[in-house]
Amino acid sequence: MKKNMLWIILDIIFLIGFNIVFFVAGGTEHEASVWISYGFIHFAYLMLLITPFLTRKTTNTAVLGFPIYHISSLYFIAAFVLGLIFIFTHPVSYKTSLIVQVIAAGIYAVLLISHLLANESTADSIERHERELRYVKEASAKLKGIMESVNDKQLRRKVEELYDLLHSSPVRSSGSAREYESTVLELIDILDGNVRKNDIAAAEKTISKIKHNASERNRRLKAGY
């Protein structure tokens, strides 16, 4: 909580400093063009603060979020510089200030949204790949643990062969393959129980079932099902 409070204080330092300088040096009487720039500077800074929350949480959040934060940073700098120009020149007509700031905000919005859409697509691909990889990783890890507890040499060899089959399986998946993946994972849990009970006959039958389902899963993927 203390760390979060420090970040909040750090974030509002600019707002406090800018507003103190703005009102102490310039007072409260300003042209509309100045207030427009004042508002857009605050809007740009607010967008900079909320940018980290716009990126979907994945294992690559930092990588995906960097371009978004870079765009927001550039927009804030642009809005701040443009705002200072209008604040110091304080033109009587508000139109130029409004048009320039709206154009800058529009360019920012287009860039931001296009990158967010691209990030969503990338995040979907990452999550799908991680979900597909989970089958091979989870099945291999479970079998590795089972191998370490097998005492019978012949049964251990069969478990090792099964491990090689699953470990070398394609990591991609499909709708028709997921049913076999679930069955394989369930059968591995049953195999673990067979081994713990030292029921070699039952373990061999379970291994045969696992091989059948794993091979059928791989066959379907190769066939494009």
Image (cartoon, rainbow, N blue to C red):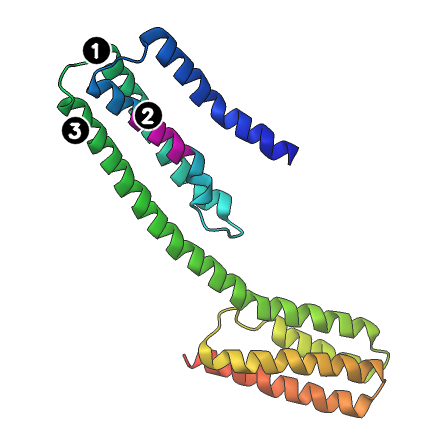
Residue 212: mark in rendering: none
Q: Is residue 209 magenta?
A: no
For label 2, the residue is 41
Query: Which residue is situated farthest in the top direction here?
Result: 25
Residue 50 lies, with reference to residue 131, above or below; the image says above
Residue 21 seen in this snapshot: yes
Earlier residue among tags 3 and 2: 2
Q: Which residues are magenta?
A: 39-48
Q: Disc 2 and disc 1: Cα gap in Å?
A: 16 Å
Q: x, y (%) of residue 50?
A: 43, 38
Q: Quadrant of the C terminus?
A: bottom left
Asked which quadrant contains residue 92, the reply is: top left
Is there any visible trace of residue 155 in the rendered image? no
User: Are dots 2 and 1 in contact, CB under 8 Å?
Assistant: no
Q: Position of residue 163 (x, y in %)?
A: 68, 74
Tag 1 or tag 2, which sits nearer the N-term? Answer: 2
9 or 203, which lies in front? 9
Q: Residue at x 76, y 79 (%)?
A: 192
User: What residue sits right under mark 3 in the picture?
Assistant: 99
Q: Residue at x 56, y 73 (%)?
A: 169
